[in-house]
Image (spheres, rainbow, N blue to C red):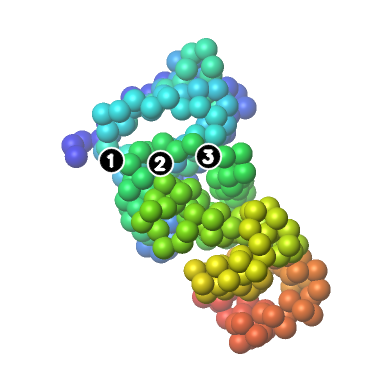
Amino acid sequence: MGSYMEKAAHDWTDDSIRVIATPSMAAKSTYFYVQEVGHFRTLPTYFTERQSLNSFLIVYTLAGKGYLHYLGVTHELNRNQVFFIDCQEYQHYKTDKHERWELAWVHFNGSNSRGYFEQFMKNGSPVLTLDESSTIPQILSQLLEVNLQKDIRTEPLSSKYLVDLLTEMIIVTSPQEANGSFLPAHIQRIVSDLDKRFQEKISLDELANQHAISKYHLLREYKKYTGYTPNEYVIHRRITYAKELLTYSDLTIGEIASLSGMDNVSHFINLFKQRVEMTPLAYRKKWQGIH
């Protein structure tokens, strides 16, 4: 790939944020880890030209306009667009001088970053246009926040958020691959909806109305393609999210139940025991001791 090269004009506003991280040996051997993360409001001469950096980069356009030149193609970057690139390859990105680029971004590596990148690039382009409901800007904000407040949880939480980010990057490419996907497009949309809203109270009638499908057809199709009823799927997502909070936070069981979408603590504990075969406290003791 050649020797490392970088040229840049670090031209951004005083309220822009850039956090440089130095991952621990544990993070480098185990986790996805942050190398740099930030939120820039650029000034007119901002640009970066680079090659042969052992890093992956995800950049989301919050406002204004930017340009990316990558793999021989120049892309215009507008609001709600995101790009994902391998920084070993030559890249050049810059602001538009008149519509100054505001961007949230993360440089990262570790774990199976390359595998995710290669899966993403099956989409055919490093740039995607997202809808307004995308969770990607929120995840980038969470990554920045956790790296501004460094403590013992920073690296595992960063890894969790990077997994969330990479998973969402793969999910948003799915509709364009619908012909080769096992899940029909309408089931994919419902799964994505429940992934975003599993902490809310969602009735089957409401879900069916929102997706213009009869609830009986929805039940049958969802079970056929996912192995779960919609209700079982929501419970599964809530239990999984509760596991993450039990492992990576010091929140109380009541707080975790509430954040997972279950207000009744006793009901939460019973559901957790049924599906995990131990109480939430026993799970916490077991898994916090590992990390």
- Which label number is shown at residue 84? 2
What is the CA distance from the residue labelled 2 to the residue labelled 1?
A: 12 Å
Quickly name the residue at label 1.
Answer: 88
What is the secondary structure assignment of the residue under circle 1? loop
Tag 1: residue type? Gln
Can you give x and y, in whole percent of width and height, for residue 144 in the image? Answer: 57, 44
Tag 3: residue type? Leu
Q: Is residue 202 above or below residue 232?
A: above
> Which tag is nearer the camera, tag 2 or tag 1?
2
Q: Identify the residue at horizontal 47%, vertical 17% (top origin).
A: 96
Tag 2: residue type? Phe
Specify few, some or many for label 3: CA neighbours under 10 Å numbering under 14, 14-19, or 20 or more: some
Quickly name the residue at label 3.
Answer: 130
> Which tag is nearer the camera, tag 1 or tag 3?
3
Q: Identify the residue at horizontal 46%, vertical 24% (top origin).
A: 66
> Which tag is nearer the camera, tag 3 or tag 2?
3
- Which label number is shown at residue 108? none
Comparing 174 with 47, the one in front is: 174
